[in-house]
Amino acid sequence: MTRIADLSADQLAHHALNIFIAQGRHVEGARVIYRALQLDPHHPGALRCLSDFLAHEGTEPFAAATLEHALSGTVPLNSDARRMLDDLRFLDIWSWGFSRHVSGEANLSGDAFQQREDFVFDGAAYAAFLNTVTEPAGSLQGAFQAAVRICGLMSGLLRHAEKDNPAFDDVLRSSAFVETEAYPAWLASPTDELDALDQAIQAQRQGG
């Protein structure tokens, strides 16, 4: 029997993407993302999935901080990984309203995003948006670490050592977070459901 604990960061990131495709923002997705980043904080697929997971109302600045951290030069990325994350950042910046197409159109085809010179970027507004988490966290690195903590909290694998409902400042600055009892139990569980989802997605792709 293959257990969650036996999976590599690569395998976990693959499963995280499957979960996001099939189920959207889901607690199991948060778990595999959190575990992948515990194994490899620089894994580009896991960083992408963390950003996707947090790119929802209320946590978008943490998604942005994740991508900015990944592309800051402190994370070793090959050219393909850097391009993938940079493309995601470009699309997210547009979807969050910090860039617009010169045509004024809001509904754009995928081809439109290949011509970046056709977009007008509001850098000041984006910087202010990012600063809502980087400034209180003390740095871009601190904001990224907070993003990972949020993922851990939402997954049920992490909790504050003293508070049942930690405040925003606790998440941004505190290191007083510990793994829950659910974490080792989850690690010991079989990968059957993850494998079944992977097989279903592969079959769907092959079926066209």
Image (spheres, rainbow, N blue to C red):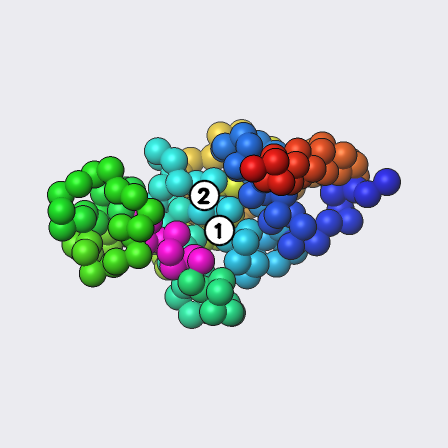
The residue sitting at 52% across, 37% down in the picture is 21
In the rendering, at what x and y percent does residue 191 appear?
A: 75, 38
Residue 192 is left or right of residue 64, and the answer is right
Could you tell me which secondary element the residue under label 1 belongs to?
helix
Quadrant where the image shows the C terminus: top right
Cα gap from disc 1 to disc 2, whole angstroms: 6 Å
* Above or below, comparing residue 148 to residue 117 in the picture: above
How crowded pointer 1 is (Cα within 10 Å; few <14, some 14-19, many 20+) is rated as many
Task: Report the amino acid beneath label 2.
Answer: Asp
Location of mark 2 (residue): 52
**Residue ranking furthest to the right:** 1
Find residue 183 and name its label.
none
Q: Which residues are magenta?
A: 84-93
Task: Report the amino acid beneath label 1.
Answer: Arg
Residue 89 is left or right of residue 76, and the answer is left
Quadrant of res 153: top right
- Front residue of 49/5: it is 49
In the rendering, at what x and y percent does residue 174 appear?
A: 48, 47
CB within 8 Å, label 1 to label 2: yes
Q: Give the overall secondary structure of the magenta segment.
A: helix
In the rendering, at what x and y percent does residue 33 appear?
A: 58, 45
In the rendering, at what x and y percent does residue 105 appear?
A: 17, 41
Location of mark 1 (residue): 48
Queried whether the magenta region covers residue 143, the answer comes back as no
